Each structure stands twice: as structure tokens, then as C-alpha cells.
Image (cartoon, rainbow, N blue to C red):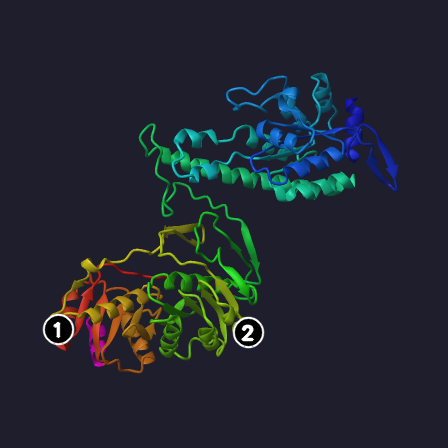
Amino acid sequence: MRADAYASGKEAGRGATAEQNEGVIIPTMSKRRAIVSVSDKTGIVDFCRGLVDLDFEVISTGGTLRTLTEGEVKARQVSDVTGVPEILDGRIKTLHPGIFGGILARRNLAGDMATLEEHGMEPIDVVAVNLYPFAETLSKPGATREQIIEQIDIGGPSLIRAAAKNHQDVYVIVDPADYEKVLDALRARREADYSVLRRSLAAKVFTHTSQYDQLISDYMASLGEAPSGETPAPKAQSDLPERLVLDWPLRQRLRYGENPHQRAAFYADPDCPPPSMAHCAQLQGKELSYNNYLDGETALEMVREFEEPACVILKHLNPCGAAVAASCSEAYDLAFKGDPVSPFGGIVGLNRPVNGELAAKLAEIFLEVVIAPGFEEDARQVLEKKKNLRLLETGPLPTLAPRMAYKSVAGGMLVQESDTADTPDAELKVVSKAQPTDEDWKSLRFAWTVCKWVKSNAIVYTVGRRTVGIGAGQMSRIDAARFGLQKAGGRIPDGYMASDAFFPFRDVVDLAASAQVRGIIHPGGSIRDDKSIEAANEHGMIMVYTGMRHFRH
């Protein structure tokens, strides 16, 4: 093939010669070539069959070649092109100028095409490659270091990066979902019209390789902590990396952010295990909003704290009601009773499937979201009438596990472990003369668990195991205590109080005593702790220290 003829034809489309048709140059077809080498064989036989139908010559390697042969698709071995067999147990197959020259040659440069002709090389127009299954091997129980290292792909990333660099001339595919798009473009024989497709495919390559390389980087970093020859333990979800790289796919473009004038989107963490907002199935209702995601996460995480049937009702990231009971229906009644005004337009979280009885109660007021492990058929029939109500099904709810929590600030990202820790029962310290009974302990524990999820400064009042008043997000602790008491009606005989941090003064204890609160639980740790203990003893109140605070900002 003459290089100048190829270049001239390729400027218009593809081929050594071209025909004119209605002002558009359509190249006369000559045999073109594709190289395919995939770990994920999904759709590869049909794709290559389509290429052959378009008069392509297909070049392939190892397992992919066997798959194509079994599918009765004609293909050549890479070694037929390179003249070199696969060596080093398949570690080297495609790393050869005969392959990379064909990919990287710029069709519109006569010099590049002359170089190919001089060395007996031919252009490669399609590269379909996805990489060795490193992530899958890494996640296999008992995978050895040698097995994992062997899944570090060398030729694959080189092939797709080369093709992406030369995307003005080469289609590069790493995702089987793109096979049909490429076949449609090739069938159209107007390849100049598909430059946007080639650019988008090239961009996908670099996303693909960056994810792959980051996973390998994390693994290699972990090897430094393991003795030679031993497989390191998998990194914990809460490990803090030396360099933060977030490569999360776009899951949903949102209508707007916290307010209508703010643009927003939801990106899903591919490493976050279920349940999470990324894994919930939306059964009905309007599209989730930015604020729905935030409130939904808090509701989901909070109900996972409880083993018994539990209900939480949230507004603006704060619980306005929470309870545990013999059933979620009863827990909802108790949670709603604790603040019958705030639930309007709120979020309800449950840790048991919703039945018809509970659904009828939920349908009585306007709610934004109900999130639960499941919804029984009779519940769906009731709630489907609430067209705008979003139902989110989580599936099973295991106990909370540590994960990474991210919060952006201007110029950076704050990263911390999620707040899943709590004080063991044996380490709770009674500092008052009054001693708690078994029932007191249950109530104090419940109040402390709810308080953990209230924005600081936080005060929670409970009766038994239901909330009756919550003071959230106040600048002073005494104001939080006053506001929560106001919501509780001013008197809480035999009630309980929880505070997310210590009391700097005895004023909060005195206020609780005036409301007939029976017991208080808080972290302790103030230089004036003795004053608070003194106040508790004066009023005959129970006081328990947790030794652990739960600020929430």
C-alpha cells in the first residue's frame, strides 16, 4: 500500500482510495485489522463476528483466541503478526513494534505510513482490551502474593493507552457495553462523524487504567507491612492512605443541591460494602435529592445501631424522634409521639420490613423518604398511592462497620474513620451515689445511642426507650438542654438525659433535676466534673460516664 495514498484516503475516512458521494468522501474498503485481548469475555464473540462481517482481520491472544475459535470466529494469533511466540509463561505477547507501530502510526502523516510500509507493518484500527482481573484475584480468600502479582497486566494497559493516544485513528474499547456503538460507527462508513465517540472511548481508557493502577498501588504499599513471602492482610476500610485518590463513577445527576441554585450530583464509592445509599433499591417516588441522600444516610446508619425493632424520624440530619419496641409499628408510634410536629416532610428509617399496618400509619402524613430492609406486598399497595414518597429498600442490615468518611473544605478534603466505636458496658462508670437498675441501664444506653446521631451541642431526653425531647446544634450546652426540655413539655418524671460531651458547669444537671430527670449519661472529662457529680448527688440522680464523646458536625 502506498503511504501517501493511505494518508490521503484516511484524512477523509479509511482506505487507500476513495469515492465521492454527495460532497462526502466515502473510502473504498480495504481489509482493516483489530486486536482483541480480554479478561471479561462478555460479548466478545458477537463483537468480533461483527468485525469480520465488516471485512476486518481479527488478531487475538491466548484465552480470547480460544473463545473466538470456539465461537467459530476466524482470528489470527498475535505471534503470526510479530513473528515471536508468547514467552515467559505469557508475560510477553503483544509488546512488539509490529503491534504498537500499527496502533500508534498517524494515518494522516505520510512519514508514519512510509515507516510501516518499510518494516512490513500494517495499521491496527480497533483495540478491544480489558485488563487482568487484579481486583477479583485480590478479593479471593487465600490468594497468594504470587497469584496477585501475576495479575498485574503489562501489555494490556500499554495497548489501550497507545490506542487512546492515537484515538483520532483508532477505536479503543475497554467496556463491553461499547462494542455495539463501535460496530454502528464502522458500519456507517462515515468515521469522521464519530470523532466524539473515539474521544469518549479514549477518556474511558485513562479512567480505567487509573483505577487499576491505584488498586495496585494500594496493594504494593501494603506489602511493606508484611514479612517477605507472606500475603498481607486486606487493608481495612478505615485505613488512611498516604495519597488520597477518589475514582468514583457518576451515579446520578441531581436536580439541584441543598438549594435550587446549586448544581449537584451523586458519585458512588465502588469499595463501600452494602448497605449504603449507593446500594439501596428505589421502589417508587420522585428522584432522590441531595438532601434526601444526606438524611437517608443518617437514618440508615442510625437504625443499624439497634438490635430490637427500631424507628427513627429525621429532619435536616437530626433525629426528631426515635424508639425501640416489640415491633416497628409500635416503635413508629412512640417515635412520632415524641415530637408530632417535626416529622412532617421528614425521613423515616426502620430496621425491619414494613408491613401493611405500619404502611397505613406512614401514609397519614407527608414524608419525603421511607428507608427499610424491605416492604411487604400489602405495604406496597398502601404506599404506592403516595406518588411522590420515595421508598428505599436496603436489604439486610448488618451491624455498623468502620469505613472512611469524607468532608470537603475549600482547598482540601478531611478524612476520618466513621464513628462506629462505643464504650463497652463493662467500661461505663457510675460516678453518682445513686446506682442504676437493669431498666435504668437499658434506658441510659438508648439515650446515649440516639445522642450520638444528634448534631452538637446535643442533649437528648428519653422516657424508657423513646425520645421525648431533643436539643440539637446549639452553641451552648445549656441552650440545647433548655430547648430539648421545651420539646418534652418541661417535666420528665423518671426520664433520662444524654449529652454528647461533658458538662462544663453544673447548670445542665440542675435543669435536668428541675424536670425530674432520673439519670444522666455523658462522657465526663471536664475540669469541673466534681461540681456536676456533686449536683447529681444533691438531687439523688444517677450519673454515668462513658469516657467517650460523640461530637457530630
The residue segment tinted magenta is 506-514
Measured Cα–Cα span from mark 2 to mark 1: 52 Å
**Is residue 457 visible in this depiction of the protein?**
no
Q: Position of residue 31 (x, y in %)?
A: 76, 28
Give the residue pinned by disc 2. Answer: 386
Local secondary structure at mark 1: helix
Residue 214, numbered label: none
Determine whether, in the image, residue 36 is placed left or right of residue 363. right
Circle 2 or circle 1, nearest the eye: 2
* N-terminal label among 2 and 1: 2
Dividing the picture into quadrants, the one containing residue 60 is top right
Tell whether position 277 is magenta. no
Question: Camera-side residue: 156 or 441?
Answer: 441
In the rendered image of this protein, does residue 16 appear above or below residue 544? Answer: above
Extreme-left residue of the structure: 433
Question: Which quadrant, please, contains the C terminus?
Answer: bottom left
Determine whether, in the image, residue 249 is placed left or right of residue 144. right
Amino acid type for the residue under numbered disc 2: Lys
**Residue at 78% over, 27% down:** 6
Question: Camera-side residue: 403 or 11?
Answer: 403
